[in-house]
Image: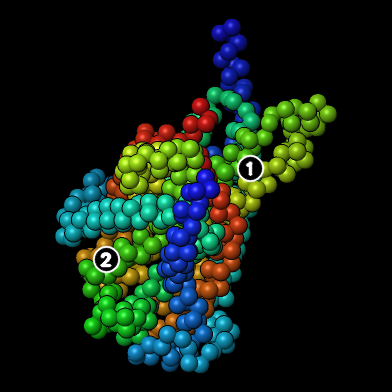
Amino acid sequence: MAASVRARSPRRPLMAVAGALIALVFVLPYLIMLVGSFKSRSEILRVPPTYLPQEWVPSNYVDMWSTPETPLPYNLVSTIVISVCATLVVLAVAAPAAYYTARHRFPGRLVFLLLVLVTQMLQPTVLATGLFRQFVTLGINDTWLAMILVNSAFNLSFAVWIMHSFFAAIPRELDEAAALDGASRLQILRRVTLPLVWPGVVTAIIFTFVACWNEFAASLVILTTAENQPLSVALTKFVGQYESAWQYVFGVSIVGIVPVVILFALIEKRLVAGLTAGAVK
Amino acid sequence: MTTGGRPARWTATARALPWLGPTLVLVAGVVFFPAGYMAWTSFRDLSQFGVDNGPAGFDNYARLLEFTALSRVLLNTVVWVVGVVVVTVVVSLGLAQFLDKAFPGRRFVRLTVIVPWAASVVMTTTVIYYGLDPFYGVLNAFLVDVGLLDQPYGFTRNAVPAFLTAMGIAVFVSLPFTTYTLLAGLQTIPDDVREAAQMDGAGPWAAYRRIILPLLRPALAVATIINIINVFNSLPILQVITGSIPGYNADTTTTLIFKFIRADRQIDTASALSIVNFLIVLAVILVYLKVVKPMRDDE
């Protein structure tokens, strides 16, 4: 063992360099974004371009909110409202289902889990036409409610899977002991089980929130009023214009990306298990 | 024994209902109902304002077959899915292998790999679109400065190069999930198996192919199939990169659906094409269930 470590050691600095290059490739677009968000309007459209701003313009982060292309403050509020509400709905709906299917065997259980699995592989994109038709008929097209429903329904499965696996890992004897002490089923869930499955719950919350935050296809057809659209849809309006206000696009993108990247990094280790329904741990 | 069995089984299912009910309602109302409604709409004649003018038989599907750019769109779709998924999986295999080894800073490199996964695909694509602008784009300028290009190239100006550029971006945003899934697969391989593979004496590549790769098959199957669905359903990348190019030379069936909805307001034709896409996705899901056999722990 010691010999193999010694044999590998000359390659370790080389691997660190290769690792740094890989890291650079993965963050490069976001570095361009960050640097671009500090350029002035004339500099970001300059031919040939500058790599770093000659003049740093932090006021872009204030001015961008009143750009004429799209009502960005409304777009940010829409993104937040839709993502927060959908996440709360997912949690309220998925937690009981995850708990019960992990704890109880009953006829229809596997069918239910299969149904959840199939939903995970369906995406709003392929059903966007049907969702649009349905919401027009119901009279709730172009509303937050419609997008909260879409986001919760399509992100439910990840939450069910990840919480299911945490519930299933808790020894049943723990429940039984609490039940003998006279605790009701809801009390057991709240006092005994929830603290133990907390990492799974946090993973479900973060994953759902980030997925809703970035949702694009369904919002594109369902939310037609500029004020109702999330940031993902609003930002596409800058592309293809004669002189785009790229510095604002990038400022908004940084605001829209940094928080969710930090959240995602927190659950990095548990993402795969939830997405592959336990087929890969 | 059998007499009491039936009602008891139903009671067990009935007891589960309050816990599963909300999930069932949401999935039925927002996933299965729109799917059915879409199927129904695909056999109706809808005006541009959404007024239902009665049954249309297979007219909407016939209109798809008569669509002049259909063969090009189908070819694009195959190139898009196969190209992006194959390149993604191959690159991810190397990346996962690399990130599985110990080296200084590995934790940091792993974290940077998830950035494109967490970031909005629209935002990632937009900054690359800007960077590749032939006049003020910094990526184009960089390629010229390091001598890879003689002069800036209009990557996003014509259908074919723009489509290939979009494929590159699709690979970039698919790498994190794929790499992480393969990495998880690698970590299920016991250390002694890996050491045995190294001591085999057959060279690292032969050992990898004969020992590691077969053990990686389940993770590889999951990553490939989930990628096929994601890439097939991908809209934002092509929407941003090729959306302003006229014609259908850079469209897949997915982006064509959105052109039918948004530009032409043909909800009936869009429904017919969506149903075709939906059936393709269902077929891939069936393959997933058959090949991967998820939920093994639950049986």
Quadrant of the rendered image containing residue B219: top left
Chain letter of the residue carrying label 2: B
Task: State the image quarter where residue A103 is shown.
Answer: top right
Identify the secondary structure beneath mark 1: helix
Q: Is residue B111 left or right of residue B97?
A: right
Q: Which residue is mark 1?
A: A95
Residue depicted at x 41% and y 88%: A50
Dot 1: chain letter: A
Residue B65 in percent (x, y) is at 18, 52
Q: Is residue A269 left or right of residue B240?
A: right
**What amino acid is at disc 1?**
Ala
Closer to the camera in the image, A102 or A130: A102
- The percent coordinates of residue B182 (x first, y second) are 43, 48
Query: Which numbered disc covers residue B164?
Result: 2
B170 w.r.t. A170: above or below: below
Quadrant in the picture for residue A182: top right
Q: Are marks 1 and 2 in contact (CB under 8 Å)?
A: no
